[in-house]
Image (cartoon, grey):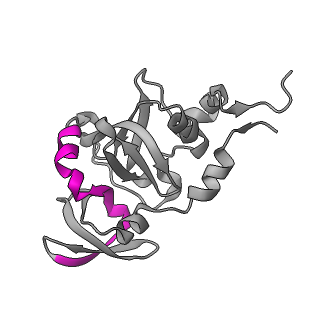
Amino acid sequence: MNYLSGFTEYRRENQNNSIFKTAMASDTDWCIHLHAQQPVTGRIVENEMYEVTIDTRETGQCTMKKTSIKYLYPVEHQEKILKLIKKNDKKVKKLNLEPTENFRERHFIKNKTLFPLMKEREVLFFTLLEGDIIRGLVQDFSMFDITVGLKGGVPLTFLRHSIYDVKNKAGRCFLKSFQQEAQDWKKSDLYILENPE
């Protein structure tokens, strides 16, 4: 059986991780960007399966669905990140897309596509549903979210339900809809052929 070296171990250790667990355990405020709303700043005080409760600077405690969140990062990185996320895909923004709770309707990236892209430090351009463009290197991923190192390695984590598209500098698409046939992970040096001819 052919396989990606290190992928099974990585998935086993990381697939159930969540940025909300990380944020809740941290001793810092987080900047949380929401779909069709202004960002909020505060601490995550409860983390349920589909909802989080945030103690915000703006309005105190509020509970919201996780699908309403686009991305988040420690508030200490706010100034740098706001400078780095300038571009916005106007065509995507005009589509007025919203996150869906229906898993099958999302723009999905296979884990075995992400893993070699992370290990080989491929610069990627993630476009989110509201047109936000996040450029950087994948640092980590789970079944719920993807952490990208922006310029200078500044970390930003976005929720997988927020994704519209992902491409490299050459415009190669890495969504499941394209990779089902392209299977670029098989072109990686990490892809091991157990019985090469």
Quarter of the image for residue 154 reads top left
**Which residue occupies the foreground of this view, 173 or 80?**
80
Residue 14 among those drawn in magenta: no
**Which residue occupies the foreground of this view, 160 or 84?**
84
Up the image or down, 64 lies above or below 86; here it is below
Residue that appears at 57% across and 44% down: 110
**Which residue occupies the foreground of this view, 68 or 186?**
186
Quarter of the image for residue 28 reads bottom left
Residue that appears at 53% across and 31% down: 120
Q: What stretch is highlighted in magenta?
A: 60-84
Image coords of residue 113 (percent x, y):
57, 38
Image coords of residue 151 (percent x, y):
30, 35
On the rendered image, what quadrant is the N terminus found in? top right
On the rendered image, what quadrant is the C terminus found in? top right
Q: Can residue 78 be seen in this view?
A: yes
Image coords of residue 122 (percent x, y):
47, 30
The outermost residue toward the left is 58
Residue that appears at 53% across and 56% down: 143
Residue that appears at 40% across and 23% down: 169
Quarter of the image for residue 191 reads top right
Up the image or down, 59 lies above or below 14; here it is below
Figure label count: 0
Up the image or down, 42 lies above or below 2; here it is below
Residue 62 among those drawn in magenta: yes
Image coords of residue 22 (percent x, y):
41, 64
Left or right of 194? Residue 12 is left
